[in-house]
Amino acid sequence: MTFLKKGRLWVMSGYLLSAMAVISGCTDKPQESAKRTFPFVTVPTVYADAVARAEYLAIHYWDNFDFSDTAYVNSASAITEQAIVDYITVLPYASYNVIVAGVKHLMDQAEKHPAMYAYFSSKMESYLFDVNSQLRNDEFYIPVLEHLVASDSLNEPRKMRPTMLLAALQKNRPGSQATDIHFTTESGRKASLYDFQTDYTLLMFHNLDCGNCKEMTAQIDASDVVKEMLKQRKLSIVAIYPGQDIEAWRKHLSEMPKTWTNGYDHDAEIGKTETYVLRIIPTLYVLDKNHKIVMKDAPFNYVEFYFNNILNPQTQVVNR
């Protein structure tokens, strides 16, 4: 759900406020208690703004945590899991190179103890990779996978899955050139993703009998922000059906907005070559006029927020 533009990460204002609450909370010293609590670090007062504080926490959040105490992944695992959630919530404020350094530092510390390494590896996957997680973020999960693949504590068979996942997530990353797609439109014309020359292209992969796809189509079509982008000819919308039931696709066309370009993957290019790894349907991508990925697998409210910022440049952004 990460979305980049020219080295920046754009984040919804509500999400920023949530992260700010965590950042502020992390400055408090833990209270003395007979029970285990998470040992928060104190952010030095020299780190005054949100970005500086987040970058400090990205690296130092786990400084007081005892990675040798296996109770934190057994009887007291709820404390550790909540700490992981809070840590992930802070990360979007930081620059990406600091995020990578912080996540890999965390995994370095966890790797010293097999039970900790297994626990943190599992929880980071659950929160950053699972399609049902609200914190899902491929870009934040990539350094976890890189650590697992490079780890001396895992044998080759145990590295097979993270190696496969890493290869999949490295395709069409934000900031990279989008892989071109060739498809057939409703008129029978052969088209390419690179044919579109507007400032932005909203690319949606969808299925035909998919309730979530119909809901997202309706949301996009009803969006005043999208309507204005289309009116100003700043945006093209391309909906691609990656399946092979062409007759069903043709019948489905009447349900699609007429202002969109609708196509199907006539050569099964996506499925055969996995040019785009579709872990969830529908999936949205945003491309710029040079066909570079701005957003990958983003919720529509993030896309709408981003487009609104283009039309009305006033929303806070975080350097990436």
Image (cartoon, rainbow, N blue to C red):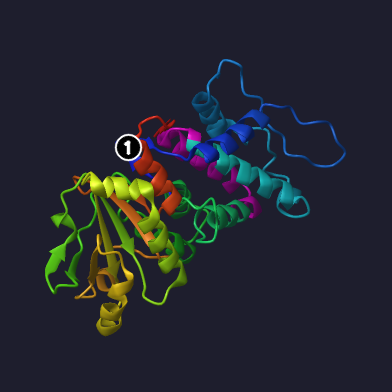
Residue 202 percent coordinates (x, y):
29, 54
Could you tell me what secondary structure mostly forms the magenta stretch?
A: helix
Crowd rating for badge 1 (residues with CA inside 10 Å; few <14, some 14–19, many 20+): few
Q: Residue at x 46, y 71 (%)?
A: 211
Which residue range is magenta in the image? 93-117
Residue 111 percent coordinates (x, y):
57, 48
Q: Note whether residue 166 is visible.
A: no
Q: Note whether residue 175 is visible.
A: yes
In the image, residue 184 above or below residue 81:
below
Query: Any magenta on residue 78?
Result: no
Residue 314 percent coordinates (x, y):
40, 29
In the image, residue 130 above or below residue 292:
below
Q: Nearer the viewer, residue 186 or 45?
A: 186
Q: Residue at x 84, y 31 (%)?
A: 32
Q: Residue at x 68, y 38 (%)?
A: 65
Horizontally, is 238 left or right of 32 in the view? left
Q: Which residue is mark 1?
A: 311
> Which image quarter is the C terminus in?
top left
Residue 199 percent coordinates (x, y):
21, 44
Q: Amino acid at mark 1?
A: Leu
